[in-house]
Amino acid sequence: MLAMAAAGAFGPAGISGLIREALAEGDKPIAPGMRKITGSVTVNGQPAREGQLVRAGDTIVTGPKSEAIYVIGQDAYMQREKSTISFAAEAAASVMRVITGGILSVFGKGQKRLEVPTATIGIRGTGCYIEASPKTVYFCLCYGVAEVAPAADPKQVERIETTHHDHPILIHNDSAMPMMAPASVINHTDRELLLLENLVGRWPPFYGKPGASGY
């Protein structure tokens, strides 16, 4: 991982320090909260700071050319530019609302619900990437199991099970488009998933498997 960081594989300057911190902890998660901030990032309308905890009820917003990497419990997130994400805790599950923009997430054990403009997605212990706009959402279940209920017809639930980006989809909320359509793998990488899982003391399930093609 450090060799990849030196080659710039993880993007913005300063990510290598975050990787060193994760590696130093071994299989233990690093401290929760904001681990890396690039550009303009706010929490509940106030400028975010590294080390700041993210709690239920918080809303994180990134500006243009900005990014936030943060840890909440067993979960880690890489929030892309120009995105708005909020978190809640309800009796049945933790809830992440992707209002707009993109986010790469890895989740530990326990039930989670992802709410996006065009669907509700139930997951448990997975990694996924989402890009959301009001009428179309891109969803890649990088590994794990998810149940996707499109807002256009919540009864048409699709169960997806993948091991390595096997079934990305577009979820539409437009009667002129199919509710769920196959898509390609875009805008996220295995190296980013590796970084996020290492931040919470884990390895992605595809790591080290013979014959696994990289993204």
Image: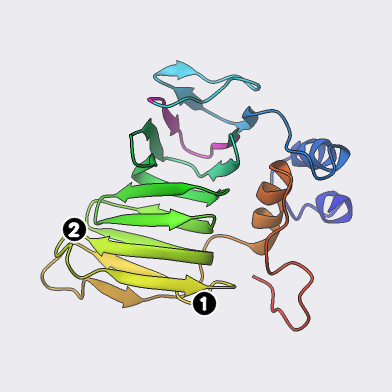
Asked which quadrant contains residue 188, the reply is bottom right
Q: Amino acid type of disc 2?
A: Ala
- Could you tell me residue 71's position as x and y percent? 60, 35
Q: Amino acid type of disc 1?
A: Asp
Instruction: Read off the magenta span.
Output: 57-70
Residue at image mark 1: 166
- What residue is at 78 percent from the left and 39 percent from the top? 28
Asked which quadrant contains residue 92, the reply is top left
Residue at image mark 2: 151
Q: Is residue 108 magenta?
A: no
Secondary structure under the numbered disc 1 in the rendered image: loop
- Could you tell me residue 143's position as x and y percent? 56, 66
- Could you tell me residue 69's position as x and y percent? 60, 37
Q: Is residue 35 above or below residue 110?
A: above
Number of the label disc, if any, that sits on residue 149: none
Residue closer to the observer: 109 or 43: 109
